[in-house]
Image (cartoon, rainbow, N blue to C red):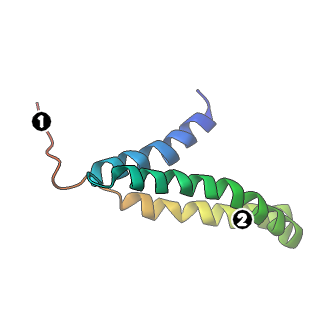
Amino acid sequence: MDANDIGFGLSTVIHMMIINHYFDKYKASALGLGYSGDCFGTFAFPVIMENLLSTYGVRGTFSILGGIVLNVIPMALLLKKPPWIKDEKR
């Protein structure tokens, strides 16, 4: 296991589990939209990175991409288990 596996697990699997908990009736549509967002990012980020590299250089590009990634942290902290799922304590 390396850092790429950990990053994939934290970014993809967790939000799909949250979507799976919140939706019952439209679960397939919600999961489809979630996975399409990942696909959109795959197509959009190379274009964004190319433009940033030509405009700001390597140092500026890493700074901007770091800022984008750090904006994910507050959003991830807002993800909670739905209140209707009971926690079974043993």
- In the image: residue 48, left or right of residue 41: right
**Toward which corner of the image does residue 48 lie, by quadrant?**
bottom right
In three-dimensional space, the C-alpha distance between marks 1 and 2, rounded to whole angstroms, equals 44 Å
**Disc sitting over residue 19 in the figure:** none
Secondary-structure class at tag 2:
helix
Q: Quadrant of the N terminus?
A: top right
**Number of other residues with Cα within 10 Å of mark 2, as a class: few under 14, some 14 to 19, many 20 or more:** few
**Number of other residues with Cα within 10 Å of mark 1, as a class: few under 14, some 14 to 19, many 20 or more:** few
Residue type indicated by callout 1 = Lys
Q: Which residue is mark 2?
A: 63
Residue type indicated by callout 2 = Ser
Q: Quadrant of the C terminus?
A: top left
**Residue pictured at 65% horizontal, 61% vertical:** 66
- Residue projecting furthest to the top: 1
**Residue pictured at 15% horizontal, 53% vertical:** 84
The residue lying toward the viewer, choosing from 29 and 38, is 29
**Toward which corner of the image does residue 61 lie, by quadrant?**
bottom right
Q: Nearer the viewer, mark 1 or mark 2?
A: 1
- In the image: residue 85, left or right of residue 62: left
Q: Which residue is mark 1?
A: 89
- State the image coordinates of residue 51 (x, y, percent, origin top left): 82, 68
